[in-house]
């Protein structure tokens, strides 16, 4: 096939265009001069807009061609300045009346290349395609109001569990629109709207439930020991499911595992004593790459669904989610006096805002602590008598010393 062609790109299925055996080639759009699709031997298919500057041909990527429709790619291309000088500000990519559909396509393409993990990008693309574009696609971004978003979110929350991600995606797109001059700074109509709360988010699981779940793990270990070890580590570390299942032995260094590509960036998962025992026992089982290998051994284990369904039903909690174990870990830490910043670090949160959902537990702990301190002071005052010289002496035995609120090993969370 020739290195370049010219066809009406709206008349073909982009996903079926043949790829080169090596390198890349361009197919130019006959309806939008300067717009082309770049096909690479690696499988990548992306839109590019071509321009000239001082006799040089310059390119700019407009996003994944499998996610950005031809019509939107043409609009993005028509709004871009043909000349793309490298020594000046980036030219405007959108017109003043750019629609939500146009800006959302650019936002998703921007994030795919620069910000998000692939799985997050796929989820955002899905909620945008199913819930945001159908509702607001033809509406100018500049005309979006808070009332529009509130009405949309209220209806969405009645029928979907993915409303939180949909709101986050729309909010992120609005900030992106502000960065491109389509809305005044700070005018995000999604700002301050509460995301749909999860019922167990920021809450303890009862001690009886934890005990039942631990016993269920003991009984199920003979059927699927890998799954049971993974669930125990989730309980003991507060890590995310794929952080545990995708862990490599090379990342395990002493009392922690150093992850270079976690959800919010590089982080460490710290192992308390029971967790270290599980890790060392598994290390003795084999010398493969993965702590939890798949059945084929060619990659990590990807799912705990079957084992978890059995475990939670046997524990008498059919609605319990694996992610609730992470919330419980955080709740135990905060309610026992561990600073929110440290809890956030243990959970791998990118910023303190993600940890503030547990702040009410910290407040309850402070109230309880204040009550205990007041009681000690009151006991001390009632047990003292004032001598004739004004000095105080104790006429009754001192009160029994209170048990410390936080042990010296506050990060050790026991579930037995």
Image: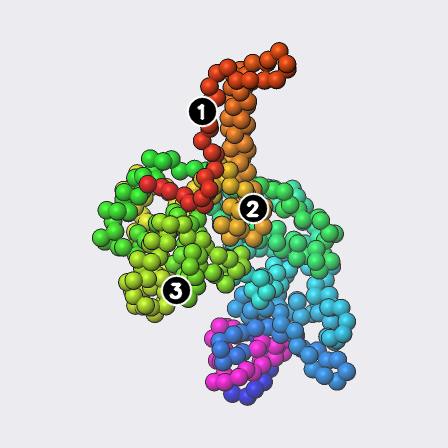
Which segment did they paint magenta? 12-38
Q: Residues within 10 Å of mark 3 (few under 14, many from 20)?
A: some
Residue placed under numbered mark 2 in the picture:
341
Please name which of the two marks, 1 or 3, marks the residue nearer to the observer: 1
Question: Which residue is depicted at the point 32% across and 62% down?
Answer: 283
Quarter placement of the C terminus: top left
199 or 153: nearer the viewer: 199
Q: Is residue 122 visible from the viewing direction of this image?
A: no
**Tag 3 residue:** 249
Say which of 220 and 157 sits in front. 220
Q: CA distance from mark 1 to mark 2?
A: 33 Å
- Residue 258 image point, x, y percent: 47, 60
| Nearest to the observer: residue 281 or residue 117 | 281
When the figure is inspected, residue 57 is found, relative to residue 100, above or below; the finding is below
Circle 1 residue? 400
Q: Earlier in the sequence, mark 3 or mark 2?
A: 3
Q: CA distance from mark 3 to mark 2?
A: 28 Å
| Local crowd size for mark 1, using a 10 Å CA cut-off: few (<14), some (14–19), many (≥20) | few
The disc placed on residue 57 is none
Residue at (37, 42) in percent of width and height: 414
Magenta stretch encompasses residue 36: yes
Instruction: Tell me whether circle 3 and circle 2 mark residues in contact (CB < 8 Å).
Output: no
Instruction: Check disc 2 and report its element: helix, strand or loop.
Output: helix
Residue 329 in the image: state x and y as whole percent.
Answer: 44, 44
Magenta residue check for 155? no
User: Of helix, strand and loop, which one carries label 3?
Assistant: helix
Give the answer, above or below, for where 226 lies relative to 326. below
């Amino acid at each position: 096939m020739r290195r370049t062609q010219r066809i009406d790109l709206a008349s073909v299925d982009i996903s079926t265009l043949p790829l080169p055996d090596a390198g890349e080639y361009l197919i130019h759009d006959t309806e939008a001069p300067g717009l082309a699709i770049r096909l690479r031997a690696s499988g990548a298919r992306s839109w590019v807009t071509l321009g000239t500057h001082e006799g040089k041909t310059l390119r700019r990527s407009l996003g994944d061609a499998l996610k950005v429709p031809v019509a939107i790619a043409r609009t993005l291309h028509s709004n871009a300045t043909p000349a793309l000088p490298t020594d000046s500000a980036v030219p405007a990519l959108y017109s003043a009346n750019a629609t939500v559909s146009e800006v959302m396509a650019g936002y998703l393409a921007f994030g795919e290349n620069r910000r998000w993990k692939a799985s997050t990008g796929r989820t955002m693309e899905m909620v945008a395609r199913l819930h945001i574009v159908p509702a607001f696609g033809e509406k100018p971004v500049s005309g979006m109001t808070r009332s529009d978003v509130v009405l949309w979110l209220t209806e969405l929350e009645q029928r979907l569990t993915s409303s939180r991600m949909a709101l986050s995606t729309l909010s992120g797109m609005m900030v992106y629109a502000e960065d491109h001059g389509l809305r005044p700074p700070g005018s995000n109509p999604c700002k301050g709207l509460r995301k749909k709360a999860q019922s167990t988010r920021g809450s303890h699981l009862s001690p009886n439930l934890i005990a039942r779940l631990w016993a269920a793990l003991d009984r199920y270990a003979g059927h699927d020991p890998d799954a049971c070890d993974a669930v125990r580590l989730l309980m003991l570390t507060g890590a995310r499911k794929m952080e545990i299942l995708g862990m490599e032995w090379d990342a395990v260094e002493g009392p922690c595992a150093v992850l270079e590509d976690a959800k919010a960036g590089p982080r460490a998962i710290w192992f308390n004593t029971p967790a270290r025992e599980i890790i060392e026992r598994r290390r003795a089982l084999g010398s493969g790459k993965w702590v939890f290998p798949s059945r084929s051994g060619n990659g990590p284990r990807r799912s705990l669904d079957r084992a978890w369904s059995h475990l939670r039903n046997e524990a008498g909690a059919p609605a319990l989610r694996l992610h609730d174990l992470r919330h419980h870990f955080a709740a135990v830490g905060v309610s026992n006096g561990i600073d929110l910043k440290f809890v956030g670090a243990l959970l791998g949160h990118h910023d303190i805002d993600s940890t503030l959902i547990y702040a009410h537990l910290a407040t309850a702990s402070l109230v309880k602590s204040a009550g205990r301190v007041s009681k000690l002071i009151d006991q001390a005052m009632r047990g003292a008598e004032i001598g004739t010289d004004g000095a105080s002496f104790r006429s009754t035995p001192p009160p029994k010393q209170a048990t410390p609120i936080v042990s010296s090993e506050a990060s050790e969370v026991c579930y037995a």
